[in-house]
Image (cartoon, helix red, strand yellow):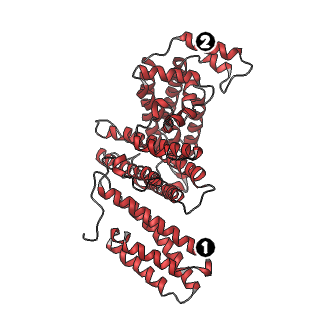
Amino acid sequence: MQPDSFLETLHSQIVRGTESLTAWLSYLDEHDGVEDLFELETWLRGLRAFFDVQHVPMAPTDRSNPVKRSFAAEFRVARDAIQICERLASRVMSRGQPDRVEFETFIESQLRKETVLDYHVGRILEQPTPAESLGRLQEFLNDAYVLIDRLSGSNNADLQAFVSLARFYRHELTNCRYVDMLLSQRFRVQFDKVEQPLLSGLLRRIPDRRLRQNMALAFLYMYRLLRYLDFVEGDFSKDKPLRQTLVVFALLHQECDALSDFLKSRSLKGRDTGSDLSQAAELVMYSLKLDSQRVIERELVPVAWEEDPTTILSRLQDAHGVLRNSLQSAVITLAQAFDKNLDGRSLFPSLIEGAEESQRLLKNLWELRRSLKSALAQGEHVELERVVMKLNEFRESALRTLWYKDWAVFERYSDALMAAPGPGEVQVTLRKLVSYLEKLVQDVSKRRILQTGPAIDSPGQ
């Protein structure tokens, strides 16, 4: 029997020279400490993303000219997140670590080698165990907290101070040996094993080894991001401040970009643009970028300085719902590129029927857009009869799931195309229709059902 593709891929992601990290993770897994370490890693990664201005929730007008903007509210968010990191580091340290002799043996074996893999001898001698590394982490986090506390209430909380603090944070993270090793690996067996038999079976049926591993990595990406969202959702029901979860959303924004880039390089490059996989990957890339950008530039913008807890909770829940549904749809869309009969609710049982209808509509719109763009590429030699056939197919199937107001616009473009007197007018109308379909994809994405929200309007409403 072919090995589990998720496990095989996770093992392939282990960075050379991190044997002692693996020993520590195994120890924590045995002593119920691996979840604390995952939380610590999440917040550390989140702060690193948050200190990058492009991932800070910000209105487009502020983003175009951040020099004139105060970052006092963002400093306060970072300060609260750093406090969480300090507490989590203490909890991880309290779990203990493997016997010191195990690490001393590792050091001796490294010193006997002519070269040391990845982590030089000086750093190993300085921080031979996780305890020393976590101690150093706590020291620099405390320094960062003091600096932020001085800046957050002053007139110096500007972009320059924010960028300087970001450089300090990134530099000090790399000086904490075990933390650096932890953050250098995107996936680990102890954190990321996906227990999803349907997806495992689907991957096993992919004959091409490289494609199989790339798809396993894509699913690992998406399930890791869904886990971040579960982590945020867990705080919604607790009587505690929520503003600091902006750093986790900054991480989600960064990782959605990384996932889109990964899909572009691994799923689209060199492949037939009309294939099921290429279409699915292109739709996932477009939707993830669209939804994550909408969250970071609209839903979350006022949260950093908002004082009303109800408004903060509402904004965070809306952002959480948008990203959760976007990621769940992404998993289903990619999986259905290999198995058209796969039921989305078999992967996400809480998914309601309307959400699946919305996802199917997005796929149909994207397929129609692809067909029209292919026709545009033919220039004056466009096969108008074929285009009309595609439009009629959409009219007879997916059009009924659009809102009434969209029907009239679609029909107007369709009629104009069929009545076009010449190739020039056909090209102009096709371009307008492609643009309209892209706008419809954005609109349908916004209407996408939240599990706690209302259903999509049907023609009868």
Q: Residue type at mark 2?
A: Thr
221 w.r.t. 286: above or below: above
- Residue 235 lies in quadrant: top left
Identify the secondary structure beneath mark 2.
helix
- Percent coordinates x, y for residue 98 in the rendering: 50, 14
Using the image, tell me which numbered label, if any, was put on residue 81: none
Q: Residue visible at 50% across and 48% down?
A: 256
User: Which residue is label 2 attached to?
Assistant: 105
208 w.r.t. 391: above or below: above
Which quadrant: the C terminus?
Answer: bottom left
Q: Residue visible at 53% across and 81% down?
A: 384
Label 2 crowd bin: few (<14), some (14–19), many (20+), radius 10 Å: few
User: Is residue 266 something one can see in this rendering?
Assistant: yes
Q: Residue visible at 46% across and 35% down?
A: 192
Point out the tag, 2 or 1, that comes first from the N-terminus.
2
Number of labelled discs? 2
Q: Residue type at mark 1?
A: Ala
Label 1 crowd bin: few (<14), some (14–19), many (20+), radius 10 Å: few
240 w.r.t. 262: above or below: above
Identify the secondary structure beneath mark 1.
loop
- Percent coordinates x, y for residue 182 in the rendering: 54, 29
Give the farthest residue toward the top: 101
Using the image, tell me which numbered label, if any, was put on residue 377: 1
- Residue 232 lies in quadrant: top left
Q: Is residue 179 left or right of residue 322?
A: right
Q: Nearer the viewer, residue 233 or 102?
A: 102
Q: Residue visible at 39% across and 42% down?
A: 229
